[in-house]
Image (spheres, helix red, strand yellow):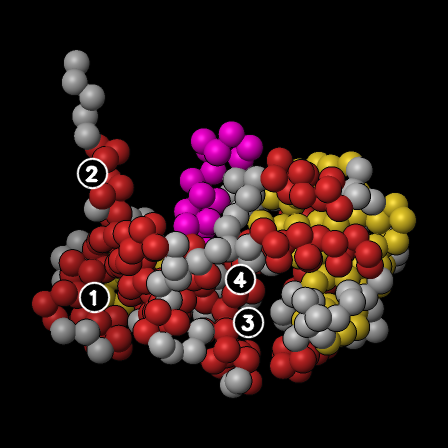
């Protein structure tokens, strides 16, 4: 019997599905629905859509299980699935749409240049066209920076909650999260482990955003902010040092520089925890981790994702002695090195 080409076709046409979901998030479809049930005409009118595409667009989302529909025909009513309400409504505290908004606004078109990235090893983002990098632009505009940081928290929260749950924090008293952004990792750990004092370390423009989030969580007495550049300044001393999706942003030389800085700042018996979409050691299973590494090529050129075995090799060279990997949410894991 011949093998059917279903998997080939599903992946080849995958960008159709992707663009429909990303467009729905861009339009605020799930937020507009909220807890309501609306007909296609009502929802289309609120979103400012032309009648031609309304039924196809909404029913495609129903077929993909991202929307629910009650009834058939023009009078049918659309409403959010439990997952849509939880993760794609901007009013939800567990909103992950920020990363989807970035995929749609930036990465969808940049990935069209993957062939060029593979041939040249060069980034395919804004810098290719002589513009400022997204990060230069963000750090120059506090309002844009806050929007970006808020958008990125949704995806991280799931991993940081899992880390706070699965790692044994009982032997440690102090934690420094390097590249702490909104302070989310510190917040999740501090909520679950009342004895730990936390420091969220990031560049100076991030400080007001982190303070706001930490204050809103009622944890200003347990989490302090430290500002600096992790390539220029020594890291704050701590028993535990964490990095959430930081190491993969850099080439090997800079990765090693960061690991050395962590080792120097850690107390004896301390631990370094890197949260990433770790590629499996055999590089056969974690599709998302491998695609994320290609995304680092598109964004930064030399940057790349890595496996637990890679992490262990680099950390051993610096002087760490014991290692483990803890699976977190979805394709992400915590790689841990003990001093």
Which disc, if any, is residue 40?
Answer: 1
Quadrant of the image occupied by residue 219: bottom right
For marks 2 and 1, give the one nearer the viewer.
Answer: 2
Q: Nearer the viewer, mark 4 or mark 1?
A: 4
| Left or right: residue 226 compared with residue 158 | right
Q: CA distance from mark 4 to mark 1?
A: 29 Å
Q: Tag 4 or tag 2, which sits nearer the N-term?
A: 2
In the foreground, 300 or 242: 300
The spot of residue 326 in percent (x, y) is 66, 39
Residue range (magenta): 280-296
Q: Nearer the viewer, mark 1 or mark 3?
A: 3
Mark earlier in primary sequence (2, 1): 2
In the rendered image, residue 272, in percent from the top left (x then y), is placed at 75, 50
Q: Earlier in the sequence, mark 1 or mark 3?
A: 1
Residue receiving disc 2: 9
Alpha carbon of mark 2 to alpha carbon of mark 4: how far?
Answer: 31 Å
The label shown at residue 154 is 4
Q: Give me the disc on residue 149.
A: 3
Disc 2 is placed on an element classified as: helix
Q: Is residue 140 visible?
A: yes
Residues tagged 3 and 2 counted as in contact (Cβ below 8 A): no
Q: Secondary structure at mark 3?
A: helix
Residues at badges 2 and 1 in contact (C-beta under 8 Å)?
no
Q: Is residue 164 visible?
A: no
């Amino acid at each position: 019997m011949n093998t059917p080409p279903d998997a080939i076709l599903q992946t080849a046409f995958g960008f159709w599905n992707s663009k429909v979901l990303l467009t729905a998030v861009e339009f605020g479809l799930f937020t507009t629905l909220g807890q309501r049930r609306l007909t296609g005409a009502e929802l289309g009118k609120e979103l400012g859509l032309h009648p031609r595409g309304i039924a196809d667009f909404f029913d495609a989302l129903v077929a993909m299980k991202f929307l629910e529909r009650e009834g058939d025909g023009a009078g049918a009513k659309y409403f959010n699935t439990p997952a849509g309400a939880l993760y794609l409504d901007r009013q939800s505290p567990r909103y992950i749409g920020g990363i989807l908004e970035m995929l749609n606004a930036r990465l969808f078109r940049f990935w069209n240049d993957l062939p060029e990235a593979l041939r040249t090893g060069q980034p395919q983002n804004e810098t290719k066209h002589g513009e400022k990098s997204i990060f230069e632009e963000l750090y120059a505009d506090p309002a844009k920076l806050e929007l970006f940081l808020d958008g990125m928290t949704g995806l991280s929260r799931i991993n940081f909650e899992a880390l706070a749950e699965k790692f044994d924090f009982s032997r440690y008293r102090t934690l420094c999260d390097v590249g702490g952004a909104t302070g989310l990792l510190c917040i999740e750990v501090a909520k679950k482990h009342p004895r730990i004092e936390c420091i969220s370390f990031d560049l100076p423009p991030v400080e007001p955003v982190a303070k706001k989030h930490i204050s809103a969580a009622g944890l200003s007495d347990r989490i302090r902010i430290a500002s600096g550049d992790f390539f220029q300044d020594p890291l704050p001393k701590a028993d535990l040092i964490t990095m959430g999706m930081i190491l993969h942003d850099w080439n090997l030389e800079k990765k090693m520089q960061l690991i050395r800085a962590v080792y120097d700042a850690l107390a004896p018996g301390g631990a370094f925890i890197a949260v990433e979409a770790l590629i499996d050691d055999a590089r056969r299973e974690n599709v998302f981790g491998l695609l994320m590494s290609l995304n680092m090529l598109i964004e930064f050129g030399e940057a790349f994702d890595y496996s637990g075995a890679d992490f262990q090799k680099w950390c051993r060279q610096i002087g760490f002695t014991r290692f483990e990997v803890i699976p977190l949410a979805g394709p992400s894991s915590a790689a841990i090195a003990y001093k």
